[in-house]
Image (cartoon, coloured by chain):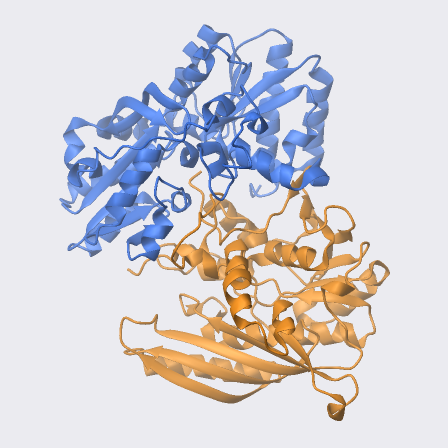
Amino acid sequence: MSQPDIGSWACPVPLRDHPNVVMGHGGGGRLSAELVAHLFLPAFGGTPLSGTLAELGDSAVLDLGPEFGPGMRLAFSTDSYVVRPRFFPGGNIGDLAINGTVNDLAVAGAVPLALSVGAILEEGMLLDELGVIAETMGAAARAAQVSIVTGDTKVVDSGHGDGLYLNTAGIGLVPAGVCLGPAQVRPGDAVLLSGPIGMHGTAVLSVRDGLEFGADLVTDSAPVTPLTQGLLTAGLRVAMMRDPTRGGVAATLNEMAVASGTGIEIVERDVPVPDTVRAACGLLGLDPLYIANEGKVVVIVRGPDSEPALDAMRRTSVGRDATRIGTVTAEHPGVVVARTGIGGRRVVDLPLAEQLPRIC
Amino acid sequence: MKYLDEFGDPELAHRLLDDIAATVTRPWALMEVCGGQTHTIVRNGIDQLLPEDVEMIHGPGCPVCVTPLETIDRALAIAARTDVIFCSFGDMIRVPGSQGDLFRVKSTGGDVRVVYSPLDAVHIAEQNPDKQVVFFGIGFETTAPANAMTVRLARQRGLTNFSLLVSHVLVPPAITAIMDSPSARVQGFLAAGHVCTVMGMAQYTPLVEKYHVPIVVTGFEPLDVLEGIRRAVHQLEEGRAELDNAYPRAVQPAGNPAAQAVVNEVFTTCDRAWRGIGVIPASGWRLSPDYLDLDAEIRFDVADIVATESAECRAGEVLQGQIKPVDCAAFGTACTPRSPLGAPMVSSEGACAAYYQFRRVGSAVS
């Protein structure tokens, strides 16, 4: 039996400073943010575009210059995939690797254009399994209308990898006139969510070694470009979009609040959580707000555009259950507060690392 | 009934809150014993919805918080061995000992695994006969039966590579310690429902009689906690002190006799140190003499590892409701959630961590 992945859990108990990399450094929470801010950003500074890196967006958005067309910009993103197990209900590491990078481009307002694929293979991996994953990647790319145009393959000794790691990088074009980002967020804006949360993370957990539980649930992994472009071409005043992957909706809302210097208040009962996710999280002592998604979008729009934006989102297959979950406020800047189910209020903190199951 | 939303129904919650508000005529201090109840209170903002006169004191019932520092240090020493696979409930992984935590041991090569059921650790032992497999058996009476089952199963299957690092704690002696404290100010208890699911209710009758405090066996969903508070407040206002069961859908008066039998077979009562509080007599379970060959402390010779808790930490007074966390000089300076000195700052369910969080955001949730 291979061991359960400790890094996929979160706990009330914080990490202390560690001299080594710990699993939480990859968890999408406070430790990940500190690693980037304190180790990578200072080391990577001093180049003409290092200011773009410091924005820490899902994609970097680069000006191409007027010869490429007025106002047209290039979005550029990369992501690595180490999910275990590689196959889970509704998908595998392959379509995840395509959709993940496509979505990072899409929420930056871009139309994804081309992807690279880097594969790190462990000696001994079955070629049949690799073939299935490659076919899935091809199908996902065609479905997302993006081309895989370059790639790389490396093999590491048996025991020095986990079968297969994938990296994808992608570029896309941001149409003229699209201006998204934390600087656009204003108090009074509406916070919208494209559909029910927690499905991807729970689906993966349900088949993880040492943890298998029966769940009528599949990953929500899907490209969100139709939704994001639908909103932008409808002329709605979208301020910012993010895809709530690692760290879930809670981490995404915290990033949006901190980056924009505003507060966000959500109404917990308005956040759609499928019964299966709620039950699994209740059993495991996890909070659905912190569970990863892979085909969802959090959208901040001007308050008056909230209903038309929801209408536009609901016209797409990935957004048919879109709903408003909250509001941007001038109070408590940088902090996300939830109105709880019974009417109390609590802070929805940025997780320190990923969730750990509670003992009781 | 799916048991997902029904016990968080806002309309029913407000009916209970209205009843509590209409009943209270003077200040009362109630303690919810269990960390799971603290979690429900904090997560749902129940403390802010209660009348000002009802003060909830967060009790010492978070097993993560109260596991003694030296037990953590012993766990770290065992987990660092190259011949050991160390298995634990998830939330013990990040509890700091004197030098780091289990995450740090893992990041430097230790084989540390999270399991959901202690029985998984027995399976791991069967599948890894060349390794010593240790399960970190902590918790209150709730987790004890499953931990006891692993020991019995390992014995039945003749496993020589399985052992248990035990640090079980018990609720009734903790209530006694709190009430015997000269500055005790708790006037009523919400007893931990799942502990009573195992042990039943009889142990609490002597406490009700001796200290004349209401003890209400309480569940863990928002309506459960509110109903427990409501019943305790009614008793206090009417001058009654009784043992009451507000969690009858899970708790039978006699508890679970089969679970009690396995616990009684495998464990024996001992004095136990509680992190932040100190030694409470007869407040723990260790392996009984028949099962000492499965005791990891003996097998790995770590019983002589001792640790001293910070003298600056006033966790004991906080856990007994004698001071507020902000009254401690170390609060927010020497002691923060990232580098906690004591138990209540360790877990977000702990009173100090909860205060730290709310102070950090100022008026955001007031």
Farthest right residue in view:
A304
- In x, y percent, where is residue B188? 54, 16
In the figure, what tint was chain B given? blue
- In x, y percent, where is residue A204? 46, 62
Quadrant in the rendering for residue B165 = top left
Quadrant in the rendering for residue A310 = bottom right
**Vertical placement of residue A71 versus A30, above or below:** below
Query: Position of A190 compared to B20: left or right?
Result: right
In the figure, what tint was chain A given? orange
Instruction: Say which of B27 and A139 sits in front.
Output: B27
Quadrant showing the N terminus of chain A: bottom left
**Vertical placement of residue A192 versus B150, above or below:** below
Task: Decide if residue A224 is in sight here.
Answer: no
**Measuring 57% from the left and 72% from the top, which residue is drawn there?**
A45
**Measuring 43% from the left and 69% from the top, which residue is drawn there?**
A82
Task: Decide if residue A135 is in sight here.
Answer: yes
Instruction: Say which of A21 and A309 sits in front.
Output: A21
